[in-house]
């Protein structure tokens, strides 16, 4: 079973394309790191409180917390192909998590930092489902849930550039690591329109 690793700096469209894959094929289930972390820090445990303190400071959550979430997610979704929305973010996380997933293809969404900042400063989210709506979306509520959309507190230019800096320093070098380990790597220009990007993804996943 081949899972699917989506990677790219914030704002490159991973979430949007992950939702399209889910609608296209019922073979997949989504593990989106940001959403799973936000669920995790709501738990009343020492590990969850510790993880929240890191997130409040825009710092990476300890790998131990990520491993716990990952193991629980895999156990709840047997026999499913998993869309890994930026689940592995650093070398130490790769050392701890890669063996849990086994075989996976990597899709790298290439986008410049300036375009990413522009996109993220204008996006909004459903505070309950965490679904993301781009700046081009004109409504004030999620048409699926009726929930009022909000702007994330950490979607400021300063915070966004800080998060992108992590990606460039820690995450993107993993592409070479995965390629040398035999994983298939696909690069997509993320500055194209959504449907053009998805057409390329459909060719990759078959």
Image: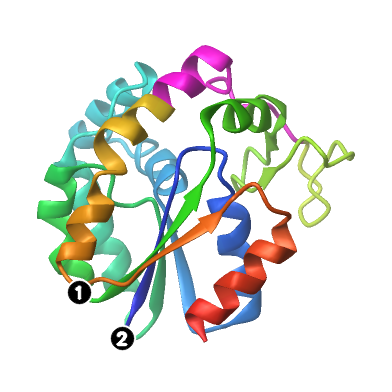
**Is residue 90 positioned above or below 143 on the image?**
above
**Is residue 150 positioned above or below 38 on the image?**
above
10 sits to left or right of 118 = left
Query: Mark 2 falls on what kind of element?
Result: loop
Q: Find residue 185 and report its image quarter.
A: bottom left
- Estimate the x, y position of residue 1 in percent, counting from the top left: 31, 86
**Residue toward you, 173 or 134:** 173
Residue 68 is at least partly visible in this image: no
- Decide: few, some or many residues near mark 1? Use Cα within 10 Å; few <14, some 14-19, many ≥20: few
Q: Residue at x 22, y 61 (%)?
A: 178
137 sits to left or right of 51 = right
195 sits to left or right of 54 = right
Q: Is residue 39 magenta?
A: no
- Decide: few, some or many residues near mark 2? Use Cα within 10 Å; few <14, some 14-19, many ≥20: few
Q: Residue at x 44, y 42 (%)?
A: 34
Q: Earlier in the sequence, mark 1 or mark 2?
A: 2
Which residue is labeled 1 in the image? Answer: 102
Query: Mark 1 falls on what kind of element?
Result: loop
Q: Residue at x 85, y 36 (%)?
A: 140
Q: Residue at x 64, y 48 (%)?
A: 131
- Estimate the x, y position of residue 175 in percent, counting from the top left: 28, 54
- Asked if the residues shown at circle 1 and circle 2 are in contact, with their CB atoms under 8 angstroms apart, the answer is yes
Which residue is labeled 2 in the image? Answer: 1
Q: Find residue 156 and report its image quarter.
A: top right
Residue 176 is at least partly visible in this image: yes
User: Which region is colored magenta?
Assistant: 149-163
Separation of marks 1 and 2 at Cα, in angstroms: 8 Å
Q: Is residue 162 magenta?
A: yes
- Estimate the x, y position of residue 88 in percent, counting from the top left: 27, 51
**Is residue 68 positioned above or below 74 on the image?**
above
**Is residue 142 positioned above or below 158 on the image?**
below
Q: Find residue 64 and report its image quarter.
A: top left
């Amino acid at each position: 079973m081949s899972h699917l690793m989506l990677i790219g700096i914030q704002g490159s469209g991973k979430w949007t394309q992950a939702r399209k894959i889910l609608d296209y094929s019922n073979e997949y289930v989504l593990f989106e790191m940001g959403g799973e972390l936000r669920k995790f820090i709501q738990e009343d445990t020492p590990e969850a409180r510790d993880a929240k303190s890191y997130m409040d400071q825009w710092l990476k959550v300890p790998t131990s917390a990520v491993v716990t979430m990952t193991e629980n997610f895999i156990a709840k979704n047997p026999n499913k192909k998993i869309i890994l929305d930026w689940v592995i973010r650093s070398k130490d996380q790769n050392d701890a998590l890669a063996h849990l997933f086994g075989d996976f293809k990597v899709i790298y969404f290439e986008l410049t930092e300036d375009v990413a900042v522009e996109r993220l400063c204008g996006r909004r989210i459903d505070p309950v489902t965490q679904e993301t709506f781009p700046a081009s979306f004109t409504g004030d509520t999620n048409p699926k849930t009726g929930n009022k959309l909000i702007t994330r507190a950490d979607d400021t230019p300063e915070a966004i550039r800080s998060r992108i800096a992590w990606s460039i320093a820690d995450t993107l070098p993993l592409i070479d690591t995965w390629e040398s380990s035999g994983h298939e790597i696909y690069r997509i220009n993320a500055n194209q329109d959504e449907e053009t990007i998805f057409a390329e993804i459909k060719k990759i996943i078959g």
